[in-house]
Image (tube, rainbow, N blue to C red):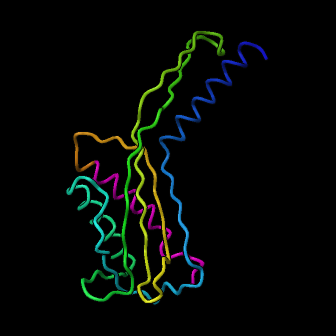
Amino acid sequence: MTRTTLKLTAFLTLFYVAASLSAQEVKYNYDRDTNFAAYKSYRWTERERTARDPLVDQDIRRAIEAQLAAKGLQRTESSADLYIDYQSAVDHEKQFDAWTLGPRWSGMARATTTGVDVGTLVLSIYDPVKKQLVWRGGVTKTLNPGKDPDKNYRNLQKAIAKLLKNYPPKSGK
């Protein structure tokens, strides 16, 4: 391999690694034997949430509740068709940044690493009659907590909307 090809390969590798860290990723799965149209109400489980900050917990719950209400589910404190719960975690990962100067990749190249926080939120939905999990989804996103709590909340709302876009499942009964 030529020196220029090596530089280009290294730069593109670093670019794709950095880009993948900043992308939002959503995964979900569900019980294919479940009639999701039968569910009309939900309640939170009694388990303590994993958000360390009570204000963050309130924001997460508020964003989830807004999405569930938009899907026709009603929150109740008594018996409910569904029980819901979430877990959250923040991991500190390395991000690689690379740049080059000069024409046609023959100039100077430089790469640096920085730490980034990656947040993961997993939402679990249970059927209390069947006593089993019927839907679970998770969203992972690079966090950039700034000084503006309203912007942080809007980003959270977008992540929850993207997560619950897959509920109820389209191919479910």
Residue 162 percent coordinates (x, y): 45, 61
Residue 37 percent coordinates (x, y): 48, 87
Residue 124 percent coordinates (x, y): 43, 70
Task: Give the residues drawn in magenta, as a range.
Answer: 152-173
Residue at left offset 66%, top offset 15%: 104
Closer to the camera in the image, 13 or 92 = 92
Give residue 164's quadrant in the image: bottom left
Closer to the camera in the image, 28 or 8 = 28
Residue 81 included in the magenta stretch of the image: no
- Compared to residue 122, the image places residue 143 above or below, namely above
- Compared to residue 127, the image places residue 109 above or below, namely above
Query: Horizontally, is 107 left or right of 57 in the view?
Result: right
Query: Horizontally, is 114 left or right of 65 in the view?
Result: right
- Compared to residue 120, the image places residue 14 above or below, namely above
Residue at left offset 29%, top offset 80%: 75
Query: Horizontally, is 19 left or right of 48 in the view?
Result: right
